[in-house]
Image (cartoon, rainbow, N blue to C red):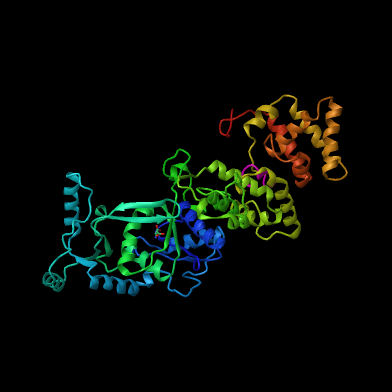
Amino acid sequence: MSEVRTRFAPSPTGNLHVGGAHTALFAWLFARHEGGKFILRIEDTDEVRSTEESLAAIYNGLKWLEIDWDEGPDVGGPFAPYVQSERLNIYAEQIDRLLDSGRGYRCFCTPEELDERREIMRARGIPPRYDGRCVDLPDEQVQTLLAEGKPYCVRFRVEETGATVIRDIVRGEVSFANELLGDFVIRKTSGYPTYHMAVVVDDYLMQISHVIRAEEHLANTPSHVQLMDALGFERPLYAHLPLILGPDKTKLSKRHGAVNLLDYRDQGFLPEAMRNFLAIIGWSAGAEQEILDLDELIAKFTLEGVSKSPGVFDLEKAAWLNGEYLKAVDAEYLTGILLPVLREEGLFQDDPSDERMAWLIAVVDLMKGRTRLLTDFTTWGRYFFTEEFIFDNKARKKWLSREDVPNRLDALAERLSVVESWAVDTIEQAIRGLAEELGVGAGQVIHPCRSAVTGQTVGPSLFHLMELLPRDTVIARLRKAAELARAGQMEPVASVDGDV
Ligand code: GLU
């Protein structure tokens, strides 16, 4: 096989959807696996809906996932330009070739006329398609209409009989009856080419070997290959990726969670976890293995491993995977990713000292084994950074509203204020010592203490997290919780999540 060249060809008309990111990832992984090239091409032939913001969102989304491209609008390449609106003369040339050969023709039907005729077809139970009214307009009539300045589009004359057979790497042979296609528009009234025209010309001229794209484009493929054949272009190989569904097996939509890729960054996902998650939707490496780092993904990715049946976008699985990645990554690297998230919440200063950074890395190291999302650090890990954290209802109910607890918390505060040094073992000794003196199990001091200091009943090792908080802070929290409890303010409350 000659060089593998795949492309991602987004239309900049919105955010980078997770489905788009999935397509980009698969095309990229295949190119990297094969040692080929990956091309980014911007398909902005929808003059009305294409925007600069959307273009920026595409770049940012791909960069977040660390998907890089060998050729594209910003990096250039041998087949530049890579933005379709900058290639209009190229499409015009090919449209002229079709007009000359008779496979293209001018259509003067107005949108209203087309609608009306489609309605009639529908009413008669015929699948609506262009009825071919302008296909054989006499040349003189065409010239007159042109001279009158009547607007027109250009249509492609499809094969009327027989079938178009697509050999798709994922789906096998798929056959489409030609009579259902209808002569489609290749140049709009505005003079712009349609998606069908531009995609065919560019895939050929950019020497794309494998068109890897979402299943929704399978139905466009017979039109594309007929155009290719008519232009004398060699067909690329096709691989249509399976649909992505929500866990309820309906088409993925906002009901299932965010569909904008970058929302997952903002929700606290690591790019490597998201990449891994997207890669195993509709593809498997064969074995049961679900956690695959980038090198493994590239080494194992084949189009044969892509499934025909729809993949499921299961957020629960995504969060689990993210948690596994958080456990495994280096604390210092994770701290770098976490910093903007903390700053966004006003929980960490802009210009920290080395000592403060070392402290943050230690916090991250302690917490990362227990978090599933980066945002867990700003929600339930909040107590590391601020006094503005809540006492959850479990902590209130189980420990903080108990009658004997305020005295116990005060006694502990007393003891901690006199321990010689502030370290894991001295803290542990103070807590266990108090329990012994009171004649209760250690848990009877540990649990109320954790509840008072963190607002929660679960978390990382209590002695270690206490060591990371300033002694004064811990003591103040113990005393405050005791005071609130005495004042009857530690009863479960409805304003806090969880059982009251
Ligand atoms: N611009 C098309 C889209 O965003 C690309 C389709 C294709 O890959 O051929 O859906």
The picture quadrant where one finds residue 254 is: top left
Residue range highlighted in magenta: 377-386
Q: How many labels were placed on the picture?
A: 0
- Residue 378: say if magenta: yes
Q: Position of residue 438 (x, y in %)?
A: 84, 26
Q: Position of residue 359 (x, y in %)?
A: 74, 53
Position of the C terminus, as image quadrant, is top right
Q: Position of residue 50 (x, y in %)?
A: 38, 62
Q: Which SS does the magenta portion mostly show?
A: loop
**Position of residue 429 in the picture relative to residue 329 (left or right):** right
* Quarter of the render that holds ligand 1: bottom left
- Residue 375: say if magenta: no
**Whether residue 220 can be seen here:** no
Is residue 404 depicted above or below 36 in this figure?
A: above
**Whether residue 278 can be seen here:** yes
> Who's the residue at 45% across and 65% down the image?
209
Q: Position of residue 211 (x, y in %)?
A: 43, 60
The picture quadrant where one finds residue 237 is: bottom left
> Who's the residue at 72% across and 24% down the image?
403
**Position of residue 45 in the picture relative to residue 211 (left or right):** left
* Residue nearer the viewer, 98 or 475: 98
Taking the view exactly as shown, the residue that stands out farthest to the right is 420
